[in-house]
Amino acid sequence: MRISVTLIVRNEEKNLARLLPQLTFADEVVVVDTGSEDETCQVALSHGARLFHFDWTDDFSAARNCAIAHAAGDYVMWLDADDVLPPKTQHLLMKWKKSPSDSDFYYMRYRMDGDFPFWFWRERIVRRTDKCRFRGFIHESIAPFGKVEYLDCEVVHRPSATHAERNLRIYQNAIASGRRLGLRDKYYYARTLVDNELVEEAVPVFRTFVSCNRANPVDRADGLKILAGLCISRRDYSDALCYLSRCVRLLPPSGEVCCLFGQVYFEQGLWTMAADWYFMALNSRVQSGFVNEYYNGFLPNVQLSVCLYHMGRYTEAREFHNAAKRIAPSHPTVVMNDAFFRLG
């Protein structure tokens, strides 16, 4: 099986120099430059990539489909320049190439680095057919087709800058030009508004989106979860519980959803009810949507230590504090609680 790795880039000389040596499994690397002013093109050529140019039009799908059009492999894998492939992933892909496969569509975990990494399943390798086309001018994706398979490896995203303002500008320009936003566009537009701290503008967009039965259940659940979190920040616990209840009618509760339920009761001093939800967060094995290690381990351990302390279960409270300390020993909350338990 031949595999083409495709990238769209602009001013990515450092990131590209990091990524390209990791692509030894690829039969070709197709780089589409959208207007670099640094040494990006030279770096691509120096690593043997095939280089093409594309006039940027604020449309990520158009640029990615341009790269696919130049690909010659049986399969196409897409990456961003600020992605990293761990050695395990490189090894698995080299092994995968040598094994005949009849699957058309492969998902891999897409992990975002940080103090508490999170990940989600993302389409990553697709058989090169007429159906291998991105849709959506931003937060683009390829609709699954044929036989679908999940690979036990990951791509790690290590961005050197935030794109919140850029994404908002693209959405605002699209709306001003009369472009009609589809359901998925509305979901990501609302998220972009939140990322830019335009919460009051985001709320009605989210409300419209989550009320549409045709929307993707995973995205709807995430929208409901975000609305619940905004309600909790305003101490509107009744509406928060309504949103969370709608969320768990769509999907089993993730660690984050359990923590939001717990927070509703925690902030009202209802320690037993809060603890029940934090215990559920620790035991959640849901892997749909965004899977965040913060909500699956660290936060529930911290909150359980507080809840159990207030319930008079001091030994157990210390045990959960120590569990949180093992995860993030230098976290400010852990340091503060550590001092408290030492004094106690």
Image (cartoon, rainbow, N blue to C red):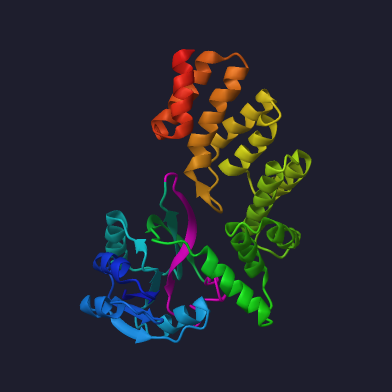
| Rendering coords of residue 1 (x, y %) | 32, 74
Image point 44% across, 84% down: which residue? Answer: 66
Quarter-wise, where is residue 220 in the image? bottom right
Image point 42% across, 44% down: which residue? Answer: 115
Residue 8 falls left or right of residue 164: left
| Rendering coords of residue 226 (x, y %) | 65, 51
Residue 307 falls left or right of residue 19: right
Image vertical order of residue 212 relative to residue 312, above or below: below
Residue 291 falls left or right of residue 219: left
Image point 54% across, 24% down: which residue? Answer: 305
| Rendering coords of residue 131 (x, y %) | 51, 79
Image vertical order of residue 289 relative to residue 166, above or below: above
Range shown magenta: 115-143
Quarter-wise, where is residue 181 in the image? bottom right
Query: Relative to the observer, which residue lies in front, 196 or 20?
Result: 196
Residue 218 falls left or right of residue 305: right
